[in-house]
């Protein structure tokens, strides 16, 4: 498929960051990257692993003007047995194709994508940190590279994979975050690109995100764009609420991202016999549950943090403090289970981890 991956080793490898110190997120990059090109009529070709470095494109390359850019995010973990595993990479490959389809970009063989990630991780295996809670973040992305200013789908693309060793999201253990419920700006609308992992969705959120920071909130909770009533998702996380023993999360309406962490959590909850429902949830449902004392827990989910307990929701200028700002039992159990599977502390009976 697409030819053998050619490997050009980096002969001047960088000094690795001190893995025992705080690596932060996306600040250091490994020695190599994967690249492959697409051209209409020729398809995907020339898969290669080359030294990490700048990529150069014509200033009229379509991605700079019309935003055909999709991406993924997943992690490689070093287990306690010193094996390196990926968490559900097949799901990332599938979603990359769904995002590409929405942006009129070409499809890729999903097994090939997973294989390319595995090969790149093996080449830079020494970059998978050993410190507890750390991992290697993997960022595959596709961009439109055809030169020209006509508005249409590009006839040329590059698929690139870069990797960054990252520290634990929670150096000091799980930390509840404050979230601002956004009532003015919107992130996405049904029929739009909200369910695609595309760069433009993020550009649309940055202004609201900056305003949330001014209110001491780490993220924005988006409401639906039309009625400004139904909860969508938060920043780069899907959201869950535990109300009177039942866990609820917004259904995949077409304007929110189909998160792999979300999917994994729903699977675990069902297996544990905890009622979980995917449905429309209005902000009024949440306010009501808060007022009558049945809002037990709230949390966000995503690859970067796995789960983020929500300590308070700022709505119409008033904070709703959830579970007295403490970390709930359910959020902790989910965090321990998923990270346990990722680091090999808990047996993976789901087939979610794949070795490199
Ligand atoms: C990536 C992303 C998520 C989380 O998805 P995971 O697959 O769980 O990492 C949620 N919302 C948005 C907008 C995202 O881009």
Image (spheres, helix red, strand yellow):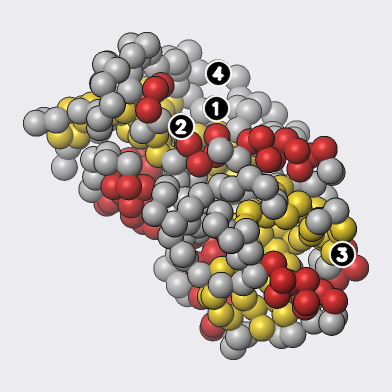
Callout 3: few (<14), some (14-19), or many (20+) C-alpha neighbours within 10 Å?
A: some
Which residue, as the protein is rendered here, is positioned at the far right? 324
Looking at the image, residue 186 lies above or below residue 65: below
On whether ligand 1 comes within 8 Å of the CB at mark 4, the answer is no
Q: Quadrant of residue 107?
A: top left
Kindly identify which residue carries mark 3.
321
Q: Earlier in the sequence, mark 3 or mark 1?
A: 1
| Residue 17 on image: x %, y % | 65, 26
Q: CA distance from mark 4 to mark 1?
A: 9 Å
Whether residue 48 is visible here, answered yes or no, is: no
- Look at discs 3 and 1 and give the one toward the viewer: 3
Q: CA distance from mark 4 to mark 2?
A: 15 Å
Q: Are marks 1 and 2 in contact (CB under 8 Å)?
A: yes
Callout 1: few (<14), some (14-19), or many (20+) C-alpha neighbours within 10 Å?
A: many
Q: CA distance from mark 4 to mark 3?
A: 46 Å
Q: Residue drawn at (27%, 51%), measured in percent from left and top?
A: 111
Regarding mark 4 in the picture, which secondary structure is present there?
A: loop
Kindly identify which residue carries mark 2.
162
Q: Are marks 2 and 3 in contact (CB under 8 Å)?
A: no
| Residue 272 on image: x %, y % | 59, 84
Regarding mark 1 in the picture, which secondary structure is present there?
A: loop
Kindly identify which residue carries mark 4.
14
Kindly identify which residue carries mark 1.
29
């Amino acid at each position: 498929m697409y030819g053998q991956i050619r490997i050009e080793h980096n002969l001047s490898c960088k000094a690795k960051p001190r893995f025992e110190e705080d690596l932060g997120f996306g600040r250091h990059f490994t020695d190599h990257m994967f690249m492959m090109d697409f051209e209409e009529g020729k398809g995907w070709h020339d898969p290669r692993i080359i030294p990490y470095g700048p990529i150069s494109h014509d200033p009229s390359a379509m991605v700079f003007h019309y935003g055909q850019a999709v991406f993924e995010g997943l992690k490689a973990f070093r287990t306690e047995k010193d094996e390196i595993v990926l968490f559900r990479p097949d799901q990332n490959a599938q979603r990359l194709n769904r995002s590409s389809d929405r942006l009129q970009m070409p499809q890729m063989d999903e097994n090939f994508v997973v294989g390319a990630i595995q090969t790149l991780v093996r080449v830079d295996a020494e970059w998978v940190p050993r410190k507890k809670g750390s991992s290697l973040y993997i960022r595959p992305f596709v961009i439109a590279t055809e030169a020209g200013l006509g508005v249409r789908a590009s006839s040329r693309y590059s698929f690139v994979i870069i990797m960054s060793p990252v520290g634990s999201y929670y150096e000091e253990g799980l930390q509840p975050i404050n979230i601002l419920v956004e009532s003015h700006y919107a992130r996405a609308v049904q029929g739009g690109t909200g369910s695609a992992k595309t760069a433009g969705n993020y550009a649309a959120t940055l202004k609201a995100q900056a305003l949330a920071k001014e209110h001491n909130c780490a993220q924005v909770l988006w409401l639906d764009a039309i009625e400004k009533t139904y909860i969508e998702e938060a920043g780069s996380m899907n959201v869950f609420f535990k109300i009177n023993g039942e866990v609820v999360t917004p259904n995949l309406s077409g304007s929110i991202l189909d998160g792999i962490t979300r999917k994994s959590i729903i699977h675990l909850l069902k297996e544990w016999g905890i009622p979980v429902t995917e449905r429309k949830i209005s902000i009024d449902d949440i306010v009501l549950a808060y007022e009558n004392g049945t809002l037990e827990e709230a949390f966000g989910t995503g690859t970067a943090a796995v789960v983020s307990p929500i300590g308070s929701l700022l709505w119409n200028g008033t904070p709703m403090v959830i579970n007295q700002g403490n970390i709930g039992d359910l959020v902790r159990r989910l965090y321990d289970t998923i990270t346990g599977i990722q680091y090999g502390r808990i047996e993976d009976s789901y087939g979610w981890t794949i070795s490199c």
